[in-house]
Image: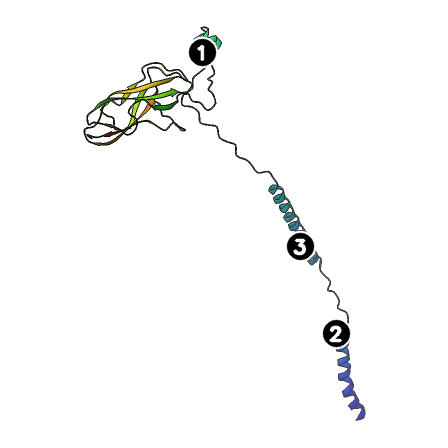
Amino acid sequence: MRKISMMKWMIPGLLCLSLVLAACAPAVEPTLSEAEIAQQVAATQQARATQNSVETLVALVTQLSNQPTWTPQPTCPACPTQVCATPTAETAAGGTPEAAATAVPTVQAGVKCFQFDFLGDVNFPPGTIVKPGAKFDKTWRIKNTGTCKWTTDYDLIFVGGEAFGTNKRGDITNEVLPGETIEVTIYNMIAPMTEGTYYSYWMLMAPDGARVGYGPQQQWSLGISLVVSNK
């Protein structure tokens, strides 16, 4: 009976000892198949390719960021509406029409063919008082500051305000060379019969219909400002 009792205690002890030894035994790495090894190798190669692509992209972005910036080029200045050709020695001496037609136009920088400066009112300055129905002639002094000669085909043309009974046109009565100063007049103007302040605006007009005033952009007209009153 004593032996049987000892056996009952030994069996559980041996089982516990075997479990402890099994837990303390070193883990054995599982053996991979050829397919599993191939999958690991492919995954490693893909990761390396992705890293190389990212490094290449970063280098390209860095290179582009170091490129010099582009500076826009200025646009060409506005060309004059008309350009006069300077006669060559050949055409001045009686050259052929073909030679004159092929002459290269030359224009001083910043100067147009058709332009002028306003030098002042010769009569009837702004604010002049006139009687209703009074007749008068208005005269301005101007200077040809362009490169082209004005002929008698050039005119003064009405562009706005009160026409003062005119046909809305005045003549340039003689030729005007570049640099010359002249007086231009609108004749036979008639003041309105109604009292008040009246304005009239005029420009020069070339034979081709081009109109020009004076000022920085040639936008200012020759003006008349009259006060019609019985006082």
The percent position of residue 187, horizontal first and vertical second, equals 26, 19
Magenta stretch secondary structure, dominant: helix
Q: Earlier in the sequence, mark 2 or mark 3?
A: 2
Query: Crowdedness of circle 1 by 10 Å Cα count: few (<14), some, many (20+)?
Result: some
Residue occupying the point 35% across, 18% down: 182
The dot on residue 23 is: 2
Q: Eyeballing the image, is 4 above or below 122?
A: below
The percent position of residue 91, horizontal first and vertical second, equals 46, 9
Which residue type carries mark 3?
Ala
Question: Distance of mark 2 from mark 3, alpha carbons?
Answer: 34 Å
Which residue type carries mark 2?
Ala
- The secondary element bearing badge 2 is classed as helix
Question: Distance of mark 1 from mark 3, alpha carbons?
Answer: 83 Å
The dot on residue 123 is: none
Question: Distance of mark 2 from mark 1, alpha carbons?
Answer: 115 Å
Q: Residue 99 or 201: which is nearer the viewer?
A: 201
Q: Residue 124 or 216: which is nearer the viewer?
A: 124
Quadrant occupied by the C terminus = top left
Provide the residue designation for mark 3. 43
Segment tinted magenta in the rendering: 38-42
Provide the residue designation for mark 1. 100
